[in-house]
Image (cartoon, rainbow, N blue to C red):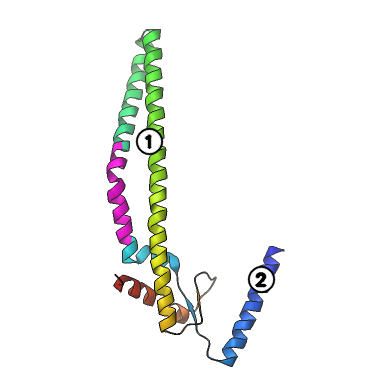
Amino acid sequence: MKHLVRHGLSACFLGVLCLAAQAQEFRLGFVNIERLLKEANISKTAQSKLEQEFAKREKELVTLGNTLKTAGDQFEREAPTMPESQRSARQKQLLDQDREFQRKRREFQEDLTSRKSEELAQVTERATKIVNQVAESEKYDVILQDAVYVNPRHDITDRVLKALNAAK
């Protein structure tokens, strides 16, 4: 049912666009937002910034994970010859260390995801402003960002990308 309503609304929208196009010249454009977010200089800068910001923590996590794995392997080798009390204490210690490692890894992922969202929001905001500027300066009536098919003559992604990279 939703598809029928959506397709019906799409058909109505296209019908209105056709009528508007007959009444006056109607300009339609398309922007590939995914491509903008991947290729724009501000996106690349944001990615580098995130990598630098989180590189130290990531390296610490990798080191901690390797240390924990080594300690676990050593415990597995030595456990059969250990007295029960020492084995239990060492097993508890390893479980505590693993729990701490998992907590730090989870915090790292949450912080990274949060920062990626912040950076993406900034990039998206700037890209939207540039799309609007290009649309106004070139007198477009509608700019689409999602479509099943787009004739390349309507794709203004390169122009927006150029303007976005030129903007400071």
Quadrant of image for the C terminus: bottom left
Task: Please give the name of the residue rendered at 43% of the width and 69% of the height, measured from the top-left corner.
Answer: 128
User: In this rendering, would 61 be left or right of 143?
Assistant: left
Disc sitting over residue 7 in the figure: 2
Query: Quadrant location of residue 83?
Result: top left
Splitting the image into 4 quarters, where does residue 10 fall?
A: bottom right
Residue at position x 70%, y 68% in the image: 4
Residue at x 69%, y 68% (from the top left corner): 5
Q: Is residue 58 above or below residue 22?
A: above
Report x, y in % for residue 117: 42, 54
Q: Which residues are magenta?
A: 44-60
Quadrant position of residue 46: bottom left
Vertical position of residue 55 compared to residue 125: above or below: above
In terms of depth relative to the viewer, which is nearer, 145 or 125? 125
What numbered label is drawn on residue 104?
A: 1
Where does residue 28 sit, x and y in percent of width and height? 50, 81
The 10 Å Cα crowd at callout 1, few under 14, some 14 to 19, many 20 or more, is some
**Magenta-colored segment: predominant secondary structure:** helix
